[in-house]
Amino acid sequence: MKALKTLTIFTLAACMCTGGILAEEKKAEPPKYTEGSCCDKAQKEGKKCDHPCCVGAEKDGKVCKKCNK
């Protein structure tokens, strides 16, 4: 009986470990900017937009709605 419990615990532990390894990583998608916006132009130049509204939105993980309608 003790062997069965031990085997069950090791099996569950192995499943949990392999599940994390086999899980596909989510890739961060680049933000979708409106064509011609200040953020779009900065991205095409390889920079980040330095407008205060855009910087604040980026800190929140969003896109500035004022500049990217």
Image (tube, helix red, strand yellow):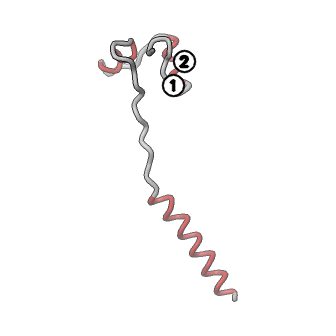
Name the residue at 47% across, 10% down.
Answer: 51
- Asked whether the beta carbons under mark 2 and mark 1 sit within 8 Å of each other, the answer is no
Disc 1: which residue:
62
Q: Residue furthest front?
A: 69
Q: Secondary structure at mark 2?
A: helix
Choose between 6 and 31: the one closer to the eye.
31
Could you say where residue 41 lies in the image, as x and y percent from the top left?
33, 15
Residue 47, above or below 13: above
Q: Nearer the viewer, mark 2 or mark 1?
A: 1
Could you say where residue 16 lies in the image, as x and y percent from the top left?
55, 64
Disc 2: which residue:
56
Could you say where residue 58 lies in the image, as x and y percent from the top left?
50, 23
Nearest to N terminus: mark 2 or mark 1: 2
Task: For the C terminus, give its image quadrant.
Answer: top left
Q: Amino acid at mark 1?
A: Lys
Q: CA distance from mark 2 to mark 1?
A: 9 Å
Residue 21, above or below 48: below
The crowding category of the residue bearing disc 2, from other C-alpha atoms within 10 Å (few below 14, some 14 to 19, many at least 20), is some
